[in-house]
Image (cartoon, rainbow, N blue to C red):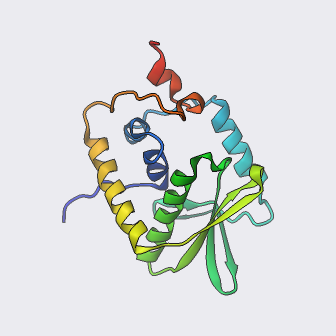
């Protein structure tokens, strides 16, 4: 059997934001750990939903919240903002797909505590196909000898890699 480079939910998350970030993460180049955006994310993760906090690691996924509702397993992903909705949705779909491959049926919910917003996410065959394409592309990007060129996008301003990408500007 051919080796398949492992993919994580974080890889999926970054893939839908910035391909360069995927390369940096897969090459273990850490973002600025003092970045305010990372601090805010850690604070939200540690502060909200403490009563229902049931973080769990399963293989290569870490789910922020797990609960049962009407006999159905519900996994939750807590995010600081819905600004990255596509990334958050695909990350959660990746978790649902991973659980499904283990024989565990679940539905998902994205939680945005600062916005008092919740969105239900359900696994579909179409999502599975999109995930498959994304995972193949993540592996392709990771095998590149150098990162993709810097590309100014609207997420750059709050990115913990911004100094790495734009130091020479």
Snapshot quadrant of residue 7? bottom left
Q: Is residue 132 left or right of residue 86?
A: left
User: What is the x, y in percent for residue 66?
Assistant: 65, 70
Q: Is residue 34 above or below residue 45?
A: above
Q: Is residue 14 above or below residue 2?
A: above
Q: Quadrant of the N terminus?
A: bottom left
User: What is the x, y in percent for residue 20?
Assistant: 39, 35
- What residue occupies the far bottom of the structure in this picture? 71
User: Viewer-proximal residue, 72 or 17?
Assistant: 17
User: What is the x, y in percent for residue 47?
Assistant: 78, 51
User: What is the x, y in percent for residue 117?
Assistant: 73, 58
- What residue occupies the far top of the structure in this picture? 168
Q: Is residue 134 left or right of residue 52?
A: left
Q: How many tags in the picture?
A: 0
User: Viewer-proximal residue, 67 or 12?
Assistant: 12
Q: Is residue 166 left or right of residue 79?
A: left
Residue in the picture at 32% in, 58% down: 133
Q: Is residue 31 above or below residue 67?
A: above
Residue in the picture at 54% in, 35% down: 155
Residue in the picture at 44% in, 69% down: 98
């Amino acid at each position: 059997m051919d080796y398949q480079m492992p993919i994580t939910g974080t890889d999926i998350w970054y893939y839908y934001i910035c391909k360069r970030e995927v390369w940096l993460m897969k090459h273990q180049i850490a973002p600025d750990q003092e970045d305010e955006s990372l601090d805010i994310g850690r604070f939200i993760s540690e502060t909200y939903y403490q009563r229902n906090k049931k973080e769990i690691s399963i293989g290569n996924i870490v789910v922020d919240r797990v609960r049962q509702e009407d006999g159905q397993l519900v996994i939750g992903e807590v995010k600081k903002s819905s600004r990255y909705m596509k990334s958050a949705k695909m990350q959660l779909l990746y978790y649902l797909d991973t659980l499904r491959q283990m024989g565990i049926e679940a539905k998902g919910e994205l939680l945005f505590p600062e916005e008092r917003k919740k969105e239900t996410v359900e696994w579909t065959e179409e999502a599975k196909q999109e995930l498959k394409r994304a995972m193949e592309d993540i592996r392709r990007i990771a095998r590149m000898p150098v990162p993709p060129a810097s590309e100014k996008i609207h997420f750059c301003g709050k990115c913990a890699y911004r100094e790495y990408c734009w130091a020479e500007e």
